[in-house]
Amino acid sequence: MAGQSDTPYVDALHAYADRKPGRFHVPGHKGGPGADPALVDTVGERGLSLDIPALTYGIDVGDEPTPFREAQQLAAEAWGARRTWWLVNGASQGNHVALLTLGHRGHRVVTQRNAHSSTIDALIMSGLRPTFVSPELDPELHIAHCMTPDALDRALRDTPEAVGATIVSPTYFGAVADVAGLAEVAHSHGVPLVVDEAWGAHLPFHEDLPAPALSLGADLVISSTHKVVGSLTQSAMIHLGHGDLVEESVVDRCVTLVESTSPSSLLFASLDAARRSAATRGRELVDETLRALARTRDAVREIPGLDVLDERLAGAPGVFDYDPLRLAVDVRGTRVSGYELARRLREDHDVLMELAGENVMVAVYGMGEDAGAASERLLAGLRLAVDAATDANGGAESAEFAPPPPWGELVMTPREAFLGPQEVVAARDAVGRVAAESLAAYPPGIPNVLPGERLSAETLDYIEQTIAHGGSLRGASDRELRTLRVAVES
Ligand SMILES: Cc1ncc(COP(=O)(O)O)c(C=O)c1O
């Protein structure tokens, strides 16, 4: 039986490539000979030879447990799940799977309103009618934190037909929810708790990190393994918890429903390898990264006008704990916006942040990178960018940003609005109409408008302003927001 130091799936792929079988199957590059030199340059000869289709004997079909099964079993053990599925369309696919799974139990769900846009897409796919719960909003930082157990309890009382609840933890900014409290509330109402832990795949691997959702009673957990743990972009996992409110066979059929019939073996291999690294060296890697990040935080706070988000945030409404493997920089003291500092970092120093907002910029660190060396570059760029921006600004107050406007009233389900009768109108004529599409200013990709919600002038102004500051728009058919798709109400 394989252990955590093994990589059964990766080994099976290499064994296949080494024996050089006659490849009369897809992909058409045939392991390299049919590939353009640019592709060989990009993926490498070995990588191409390992790019094989699903249903290959000895890898994912044949004697059980196949290497594919064995490797996913190892992932389940490493993350503490009853069962784990690998995903090739990111944590986005995990959210699709989770809501389609809940859709087997009924038609209503309680959902955190600042969910990732993939959760909203999943509401469209599943047809579930959401009762939205506002996260706690930070009045000073102007960012959204997590949902509280009390808020969940109220929503579940108001929605007795709800068949599940979905929350996000950690947030982009590192705030962690009271998952144990939320799971207790959900279970007291007889429904499963789904946790979008896209940003928390590293949590099980060090005792100084907040406890992972699976260990706190979550029923289904979505994990974006590529974000912090180091698998290839687009690879992720969904983990089934140990309760009995979610059926394994239902999750399985939902994974199949939203998966290509040709999942990438390279993405799968990266998950097998990242799991080994996390399970066998995760503690040591996180330890080094946490130490380097603690030093980085101190250095950031010495830059005039900058502060950092850290464990001091824990205890604020909607923040139970803080993930120290995230560097969120509070820029308010510089009187320059995070958008402006991130632009200077990018244009003048080729330093690219994960996210920039009005008051906070987020730098993401991988679990296994040399965080000390990476931080030197970030700190050097930050010092110069802050100096240049404050000089240019002459100490003036930064431009006032419109606060995020209140979310619109939900008039129909996201699915009814997305698929029902609709028309395209000029953006200025869309005020007062019901949106037939999501509008999510990216980053952070949290929809400002959902299909089914009534549009307001403030919301449209806010999105325009984010785009003007270099953000982009996801979900809209016209990414420049000149026109909008709205529902035709009968
Ligand atoms: C909370 C959350 N959930 C899900 C996702 C989607 O993850 P992926 O890009 O792996 O599909 C993201 C991406 O940023 C996210 O922030």
Image: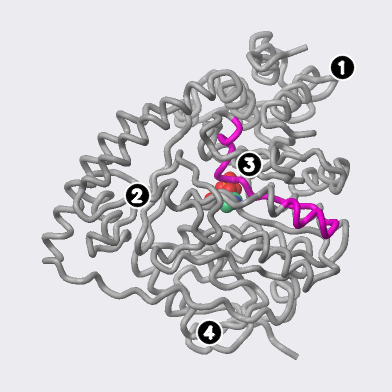
Residue, x 38% and y 29% (percent of image)?
291
Disc with the residue nearer the chain's start (3 vs 1) = 1
Q: Bounds of the magenta span?
A: 183-204
Q: Nearer the viewer, residue 449 or 198?
A: 198
- Frontmost of labels 2 and 4 is 2
Residue type at tag 3: Ser
How far across and how far down the image is residue 167, in percent? 65, 56
Q: Is residue 296 left or right of residue 90?
A: left
- Extreme top residue here? 19
Position above or below: 301 against 402: above
| Camera-nearest label, 1 or 2 | 2
Q: Which residue in the structure is indicated by mark 1?
A: 63
Q: Is residue 276 above or below residue 452?
A: above
Q: Is residue 468 magenta?
A: no
If you read the primary sequence from the N terminus, does the residue marked by circle 1 or circle 2 appear first? 1
The amino acid at mark 4 is Ser
Asked which quadrant contains residue 131, the reply is: bottom right
Sequence-first disc among 4 and 3: 3
Label 4 CB sits under 8 Å from any ligand 1 atom: no
Of helix, strand and loop, which one carries label 4?
Answer: loop
Residue 456: mark in rendering? 4
